[in-house]
Amino acid sequence: MSETTQQARQPGTPGAGLLELDDVSVTYRIAAGEVPAVRGVSLTLGSGSALGIAGESGSGKSTLAMALLRLLPKDARIGGRILLDGEDVLAMKWGRLRAVRWAGASIVFQGAQHGLNPVRRIGDQIAEPLLVHDLARPEAARKRVAELLDQVGLPAWRARSYPHELSGGQRQRVMIAMALACAPKLIIADEPTTALDVMVQAQVLTLIKELVAEHGISLIMISHDLSVLADVCDRLAVMYAGRVIEHGPSAEVFHAARHPYSRALAAAFPTVGDPASRMAPRGLGGDPPDPMRLPGGCSFHPRCPVALDGCASLDVELWPAGPDRTAACVHVREKEEAS
Ligand code: ADP
Ligand code: MG
C-alpha cells in the first residue's frame, strides 16, 4: 500500500462523520430571479460508508454535489455549513480548497467523454495530478498509472491510448482511475453510469462498489435510479424539489419507502439498469416542479396519490420514520404520533 493510501485511511475527528451537511441551501441568481435549487439539506456521511442521493432530474442532486467542493458557478449562493473531515469547506481559502479537491475528495461526473482531453494519452491524464501536486516523480507516477489502470480493470498498455480509442465503459473506468489517483477519502460519483448501456453499467457499478470497500473510501453516489443506489450504498437520501424528503438505510428506503415519492421512485426502477425505465420514472404522473414556482405546502402534493386536503398548505419537516430513518410526509407524522 502506498503512503498516500495510508494517509487517506486515517480516520477523521473521532465521533464525527467524514462529511457533515447542516442546513445546506443553494440559490442560483439569474436574470429572471432566484432559483432555490437546494433547500435546507442536513446529512452525515460516516468514514468508509456510501450514501446514495436519488431524485428525478432537476431535484438538486448535482447542485448539492458541486456545493460540497464549491464547484458552483459565481451566481450561486451557498448557505448552511459543510464540514469535510471537521474542516469548514465554505470557510476554506482557495489554496486549501484546491488541495482538498485533489487529495481529499474527487468527483466522477456523468458522461466520462467530456472529462477527458481528446488529444492527450490517458496515462498522461491520470498521472497529471500526481505530478502537479508533487505526489510522485515521473517514474513513480508511471508505475502508479499502471497500478490504477489495473485497479479499474484495464491493461497497463492502455496508458498510451487516446480517449477516442476506448469504449464508453472504458472511458468511465479511466475517470474512476483519475478519481482514485490521489487516494481521496471521498469520491462523489454523479450519475456515473447513466450514459452507459445496461451490461457495462452493471460492470462499472460493481467496480465502484469493490474499490470503495477495498480502499475504505467514502462514497456519495447520485442517480435518478433508486435500484442502482440501493445496490451500492448503505444509506439513501431521496431529494424532491431541492429538499431531502426521505433518508434511511438503503434496503429499507428501497423496499419499504415511507414517503409516497420514494415509493413511486422505487416502483419506477424495480431492477438495476432496467433499460425501459432508465430515463424517466414510470408510473409517476406529472413533472417535478420548477424551483421558481414551487407549490405551497408539501412540494409533492400536486403529484401525490395519497395527498390530503391539508397538504396544499402544510409543509411537513423530516420526521422520525423508524430507527435511523426519517421522512417528510404528513402520513408518516400522523402514524408515528399515534404509535
Ligand atoms: P439534478 O442534478 O437533480 O438534475 P440540478 O442540481 O442540476 O438537478 O438542478 C436543480 C435545479 O437548479 C434545476 O431546476 C435547474 O434548472 C437549476 N439549475 C441548475 N444549474 C443552474 C444554473 N447554473 N443556473 C440556474 N439554475 C440552475
Ligand atoms: Mg444532475
Image (spheres, rainbow, N blue to C red):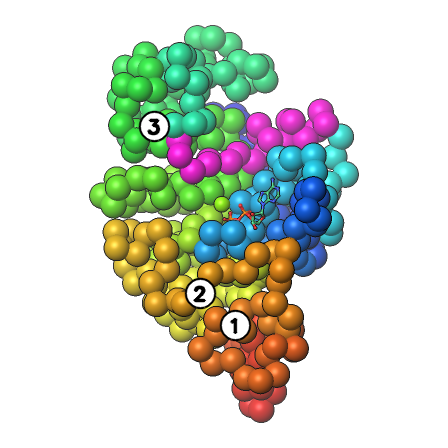
Where is mark 2, residue-wise? 286
CB contact under 8 Å: marks 1 and 3: no
Nearer to me, 314 or 19: 314
Q: Earlier in the sequence, mark 2 or mark 3?
A: 3
Q: Dot 1, crowdedness within 10 Å: few (<14), some or many (≥20)? A: some
Mark 2 secondary-structure assignment: loop
Residue 43: image x %, image y %?
61, 57
Q: Residue at x 28, y 59 (%)?
A: 271
Q: Which mark is residue 171?
A: 3
Where is mark 1, residue-wise? 302
Query: Which quarter of the figure is the N terminus placed in?
Result: top left
Using the image, determine if residue 324 lies above or below residue 275.
below
Magenta stretch: includes residue 52? no
Q: Indicate which label's residue lies in the foreground, 2 or 3.
A: 2
Nearer to me, 4 or 119: 119
Q: Quadrant of residue 126?
A: top left
Tell me where the magenta segment starts and ends, as one range: 94-112
Q: Earlier in the sequence, mark 1 or mark 3?
A: 3
Amino acid type, label 1: Pro
CB contact under 8 Å: marks 2 and 3: no
Amino acid type, label 2: Gly
- C-alpha distance separating marks 1 and 3: 41 Å
Residue 127: image x %, image y %?
46, 16
Q: Is residue 148 visible?
A: yes
Q: Residue at x 46, y 35 (%)?
A: 108
Mark 3 secondary-structure assignment: helix
Query: Which quarter of the figure is the C terminus placed in?
Result: bottom right
Using the image, determine if residue 263 lies above or below residue 184.
below
Amino acid type, label 3: Arg
Horizontal arrangement in the rendering, residue 252 relative to residue 247 (left or right): left
